[in-house]
Amino acid sequence: MNNENSTNGDIGRAAMEIIIHAGDARMLITEALEAIAKQDFDLYEKKLAEAHKEMKIAHGIQTDIIQGENSLEETEYLLLFTHAQDTLMTIASELNITKQMYKIFKGYEERISALEEK
């Protein structure tokens, strides 16, 4: 096996790892959103922390690949890596939106609780 195929194989495996970890993060984000809907904010925080861990792993893998390209290692374009980056970016957006939704719903919950105390 020549070095080029080995490098591309490594990138393909890395792309799959990014997709797997980002996909796990998406599942945890969905569970966090369901927790918000049930006003279970403790569960939300747990699920979001787990999602952050998965995203950090995926982002680290992506960074390693990109830094490898910057160190003059010649790599061939792989559609799978582009898909992995797209998946990671999309789920990062979902994570950010989920955080904002939490702030909104937590704020509503606090306001309703304050009104009920009056």
Image: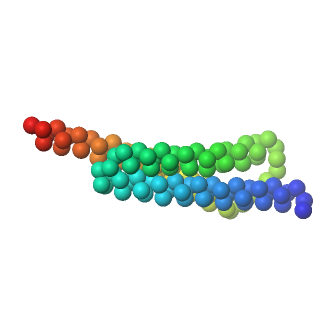
Most extreme residue toward the left, as rendered? 118
Most extreme residue toward the right, as rendered? 2
Residue found at x 83% / y 58%: 6
Residue found at x 77% / y 56%: 10
Out of 49 and 73, give the one closest to the viewer.
49
Relative to 74, 30 lies left or right: left
Q: Which percent across, then down, holds residue 4?
A: 85, 57
> Which quadrant holds residue 114?
top left
Relative to 72, 79 lies left or right: left
Q: Measured along the vertical axis of the image, is residue 51 above or below residue 20?
A: above
Residue found at x 44% / y 46%: 46
| Model colouring | rainbow
Quadrant location, the N terminus = bottom right
Out of 116 and 7, give the one closest to the viewer.
116
- Is any atom of residue 65 visible in this view? yes
Q: Which percent across, then down, holds residue 59?
A: 61, 46
Relative to 69, 56 lies left or right: left
Q: Which percent across, then down, holds residue 42?
A: 36, 45
Q: Which percent across, then down, holds residue 31?
A: 42, 56
Quadrant location, the C terminus = top left
> Which quadrant holds residue 100?
top left
- Is any atom of residue 86 visible in this view? no
Relative to 16, 87 lies left or right: left
Q: How many marks?
A: 0
